[in-house]
Amino acid sequence: MEKILIIGACGQIGVELTLALRKEYSNQQVIATDIRDEHELLKGTGPYAILNAMDASALLEIIRKEKITQVYLLAAVLSATGEKDPKRAWDINMQSLMQLLDIGVQEKLHKIYWPSSIAVFGTSTPKQNTVQKTIIEPQTVYGISKYAGELWCQYYNDRWGLDVRSLRYPGLISWKSAPGGGTTDYAIEIFHEALRSGHYTSFLDKGTYLPMMYMDDAIRATIELMESPSEKIKSRMSYNVSAMSFSPEEIAAEIRTHIPNFTIDYAPDFRQKIAEGWPQSIDDSAATSDWGWKPEFDLRKMANEMLTHLKG
Ligand code: SER
């Protein structure tokens, strides 16, 4: 029987992934942990513990005590927050991964999931339909830590046969749980502001296209990857996955089909430079051919879901 540990369960991905895995397995088989107090939506749905992702001995203890067989490590410092304190971002992102990989080998974990990001790409990468294997020169500390992490995952798989799996998420759009300091967060804020005040000042400029994905697709991609037979997982770096790509004015136009008086203006800040270093659209054909990935949400469907749920 699989027993799953989620690290970072109260974050943007963690909340929804924990709920989805508890539906798929049983509530008791999925232990949620985070450095923060339990998220409202997790309360009453299954076991919860406080865990600092940097604390290797606490991690080992919970893995042994709960007889954990799979770990999802979601705790990370994202792109925008990372640039404010690069050393701290590097330490948190790398130390949490390295100690888990070691424990994974030592405790013979069945599987580990660790997310990467489109932030691995940089200005030297081709911007349109960016393929999985291409020029990769990340420019943020977040991107550097994700790329280094991908290489370490591949190394542990190659050297010790550790079953680590990974996706390069695009910007993730969700309504249940708040985003945590990313460059793509504007695409969530815009919905909240559209409903609250009818106006949004975007920190990314007009014409800034970025790859994005609705959270339901991201959760399904993650679980499908983790449940695929291991011979189908041909990349032990990280898979490109994609769903849609839009600019601030395009998402604003989509919101206007629901809220006709909605207005947007632009005040780009330091996050503009980060966005300009990333691809505008992603080729995810390797994920499609290796384990059958297919997105379900485009801009129209995603915007409709976001506004319906946020209106309550
Ligand atoms: N959403 C993330 C960020 O903007 C990208 O992985 O940092």
Image: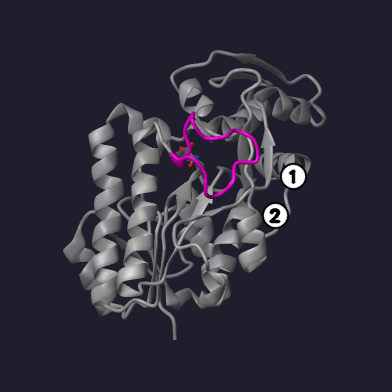
Q: How is the image coloured?
A: one colour
The answer to whether mark 2 and mark 1 are in CB contact below 8 A is: yes
Task: Pick whichever, 194 or 121, lies toward us.
Answer: 121
Residue in view at x 32 percent, y 66 percent: 156
| Residue 79 drawn above or below residue 24 | above
Q: Quadrant of residue 210?
A: top right
Image-quadrant location for residue 266: top right
Q: What range of the chain is rendered magenta?
A: 120-136
Identified by mark 2, the residue type is: Pro
- In the image, is the residue at mark 1 within 8 Å of ligand 1 by its beta carbon? no
User: Who's the residue at 44% across and 57% down the image?
Assistant: 237
**In what quadrant of the picture does the C terminus appear?**
top right
Label 2, label 1: how many angstroms apart (C-alpha)? 8 Å
Q: In the shown orientation, is residue 53 left or right of residue 247?
A: left
Q: Position of residue 169 (x, y in %)?
A: 53, 48
- Three-letter code, disc 1: Asp
Residue under label 2: 295
**Element type at mark 2:** loop
Q: Is residue 249 left or right of residue 9?
A: right
The residue beneath circle 1 is 298
Q: Nearer the viewer, residue 226 or 39?
A: 226
- Residue 13 - label: none
Res 260 seen here: yes
For the residue pair 274 and 200, the one nearer the viewer reads as: 274
Residue 180 percent coordinates (x, y) = 44, 40
Question: Quick check: is 211 in the magenta stretch?
Answer: no
Q: Position of residue 132 (x, y in %)?
A: 55, 49
Is residue 56 positioned above or below 265 on the image? below
Secondary element at image label 1: loop
Indicate the position of residue 243 as horizontal and vertical percent values.
Answer: 67, 47
